[in-house]
Amino acid sequence: NSLHFQSQWWLDEYDLTSLATGEGVTVADIDTGIDSSHPDLNGVVIGGADFSGSGRPNGTSPVGPSGFHGTMVASLIAGQGRETGGVAGIAPDVKLLSVSIGLGLPDADTDRQIAQAVRWSVDNGAQIINLSISRNSVSWPASWDSAFLYAMDKGVLIIAASGNESQNLKSATAPATLPGVVSVTAVDEDNQTVAGAGSSGIGVSLAAPGVDLVGSFPGGDVRRWSGSSAAAPLVTGVAALILE
């Protein structure tokens, strides 16, 4: 299997296999839901909620046209690949809250759903929130100010993908642009940015591996992927190690 644990170069490149494991840390993955039946995520998801109105109430079903996305993100944080031979997360002993929103669903008020999801995550024990999502705008709704401030006031760290540059937007996009949010862009194995796999310039806090990564895919599969969405959960995983 070309996607075996040994091919996950970022783990060795940054010496992330010999540190802590994230034990005792709870992370909320606000995304498109986590397929908790995937072997790489067995026993990792301890709770969740669905704000899309389309998924399982506990957030453990893929939602919308990019329903695979939340599972891939989750695997890079807490995948059990050291045991399964699949995707190995940075912090394999972290426990996840799967909080699903309706990204890409027609008429979905994702602005409102994200604000609700952030508050729910804080109230249900998240110490770190991962947001590998983009509003495709540098601005954000007022509801996010109060929700994100609520999280920060409670000492919850929020880490967000910077967004992937397009013809219209080269800079980071919300929620990565909110004050106090750790904004993560993607670099390749040579620590270089790659067009379309992240954003650059003002509004970016950190860079992490995010090009030619692998992630667990719903249905027990593993797929390659790239982008700031893949880089953010690596930073979330490292933050969990530090918090432990």
Image (tube, rainbow, N blue to C red):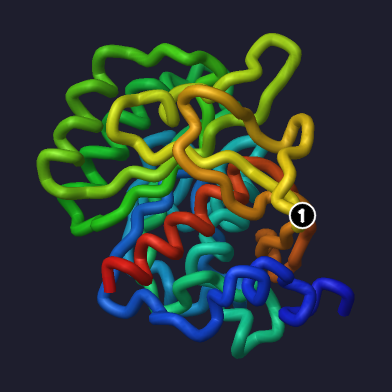
Q: Tell me where residue 63 appears, x and y as whole percent.
A: 55, 42
* Quadrant hosting residue 145: top left
Most foreground residue, 100 or 198: 198
Most foreground residue, 115 or 12: 12
Q: Tell me where residue 159 appears, x and y as whole percent.
A: 40, 44
Looking at the image, which residue is at 49% across and 32% down?
204
Looking at the image, which residue is at 66% across and 60% down?
218
Q: Tell me where residue 203 appears, x and y as whole percent.
A: 46, 26
Residue 103 vertical placement versus 25 (above, below): above
Q: Tell me where residue 94 appears, x and y as whole percent.
A: 38, 72
Left/right placement of residue 191 relative to residue 224 reads left
Residue under label 1: 190
Residue 64 vertical placement versus 28 (above, below): above
Of the residues shown, which amino acid type is indicated by label 1? Answer: Asp
Q: Quadrant of the C terminus?
A: bottom left
Looking at the image, which residue is at 58% across and 39% down?
185
Left/right placement of residue 212 relative to residue 191 reads right
**Which residue lies most toward the bottom here?**
83
Looking at the image, which residue is at 65% across and 86% down?
84
Label total for image: 1
* Quadrant hosting residue 98: bottom left
Left/right placement of residue 92 relative to residue 167 reads left
Most foreground residue, 87 or 238: 238
Neighbours of disc 1 within 10 Å: few (<14), some (14-19), many (20+): few
Q: Quadrant of the N terminus?
A: bottom right
Q: Secondary structure at mark 1?
A: loop
**Which residue lies most toward the right here?**
2
